[in-house]
Amino acid sequence: MEKKIFDLYDREKQLLGEGPQVLGHGDPVELARFARRLFERFAAVVRENEDLTKHADRQERRLFKLNQSLKLQARELDEKKSALEALSDKLAKYLPPQILKAMFAGRHDITVKTQRKRLTVFFSDIKDFTQTAESLQPEALTAYLNEYFSEMTRIALSYGATIDKYIGDAMMVFFGDPESRGEAEDARACVSMALEMQDRLQTLRAVWHARGFQQPFVVRMGINTGFCNVGNFGSDERLSYTIVGGEVNVAARLESKAAPGHILISYETYALVKDLVKVEERELVKMKGIARDIRTFEIIGRSESQLSSEPLIWQHGAGVSICINPGDLSFQDRAELAARLIATAERLSS
Amino acid sequence: MKDLFIDATERTPAVRFRAESCELSLEGESYPEDVAAFYGDVIPVLESWSESDAVRIHVLVRLIYINSSSMKALYRIFDILDNGRELGKTVSIRWCYLVDDDVMQELGEDFKDRFPDLDLFLEVVE
């Protein structure tokens, strides 16, 4: 059967088509019949048109309501988004930024799952913290400790470290997960970070001493490179993104063996940063659960190629406290400081 | 008379016409890209019902959204049903609308006003 083409206005068009012939013919009977059909059709079209107009107005009303509702939803979503951003900002202070970033990008697995990976692990601890704490007012201790952690954290993050946790006055940091620039680069970043931390601590100690902190914090640091288990530990209800393993314990032990104000690294780390630092070998360390004797190296300075970033002047004693880190200064700051130093030298010599 | 079964799409309603029991249903949304093409399949079926010996028809209209062109096509369907009624056939129509859909409710009331002799029953559904 041939498909019938349906035209929405076929009846009206048919009348319009017949019109010229009927009008031209002039037959009164035909005209009267045509006029009646035309009238009936016209009446129907008017009725339909009335209903269509009403329907269109109602649809418009519905669209307006929907639009209002969408605007309300958009506003609510904006509010929720702002609340989530505020929450994210708060969470960011409790989670390693790389993890937070990966979670928001949907790349971070939140199941109890770990993997073995070669990481460079860093531990730091304040020498004689308990005694130091007892000698300070609690408010002062809190202020110095916050300043210390803020500065160390800023430096760690600038090197791309994953800050695992703060344990009392200690810091546990690692490089190589969730982001890695390769084992060697991770180790170099870690050692460079530790060097900058010790540099910064020298400055801070001078500042703190000037403020009345008689025995400012002296920090031990230990670094080791080795295979660790990294990932989410805990249960489905409560997870902790951290690292465990014998090599982690080695880093902690190196920190405890380090001389106050120094950095002690294992041979495994040293092998990756030889061109970066000057070292002196220290005594072997034996550890339960670690088959090898651990060769240790104390960093005594940056290698020649790294010297340009060392402090130009470091002097601390009775009546004088100077530490200048050119790397921390802008060109303008350097020029201003140079002028002040010249003026100071003239005053001293006169 | 032949059966007609058209599945619903995002823009067109499901159409079911069972010739044996003379039941027609239109369910879903109706804003076809080509109204003439879509309803061009439906209207001939109803015209063949009108011309047949069938003595009754049960119609279910359960539309969620209908645009102006589809409404014009629906007028044509109701015209055919009303002609059938004038020929002595029994026509019963259930016009269903969702509980908060005042647009489809008021449109059903308009059709009831325009075709007062048709047995058109408005029914709210969840």
Image (cartoon, rainbow, N blue to C red):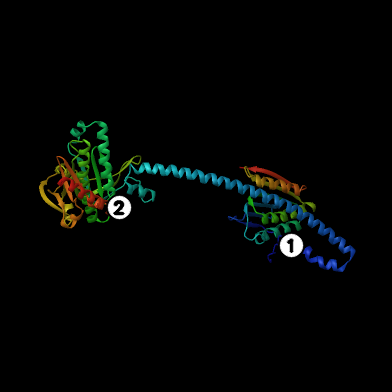
Under mark 1, the amino acid is Asp
- The residue that appears at 37% across and 48% down in the rendered structure is A103
Read off the chain for label 1.
A
Question: Residue B85: x, y in percent?
Answer: 77, 51
Q: Can residue A117 be seen in this view?
A: no
Question: Residue A213: x, y in percent?
Answer: 20, 36
Front one among A226 and B77:
A226
Residue A68's image quarter?
Answer: top right
Q: Which of marks 2 and 1 is in front?
A: 2
Compared across the picture, whether A15 is left or right of A110 comes to right
Compared across the picture, whether A328 is left or right of A44 comes to left
- The residue that appears at 76% across and 54% down in the rendered structure is A46
Circle 1 residues within 10 Å: few <14, some 14–19, many ≥20: few
Q: Which residue lies furthest to the left in this view?
A: A283
Read off the chain for label 2.
A
Under mark 2, the amino acid is Glu
Front one among A40 and A78:
A78
| Relative to A201, residue B36 above or below | below
Q: Determine which of the numbered discs, if any, sits on residue A10 in the image.
A: 1
Q: Can residue A30 be seen in this view?
A: yes
Question: Residue A313: x, y in percent?
Answer: 17, 49
Location of mark 2 (residue):
A179
Q: Residue furthest front?
A: A350
Front one among B28 and A150:
A150
Question: Residue A345: x, y in percent?
Answer: 17, 48
Residue A123's image quarter?
Answer: top left
Circle 2 residues within 10 Å: few <14, some 14–19, many ≥20: some
Front one among A80 and B89:
A80
Asked if the residue under mark 1 is in contact with the one under mark 2, i.e. CB atoms within 8 Å, the reply is no
Q: Determine which of the numbered discs, if any, sits on residue A335 in the image.
A: none
Q: Which of marks 2 and 1 is nearer the N terminus?
A: 1
Q: In which quarter of the image is the N terminus of chain A?
A: bottom right
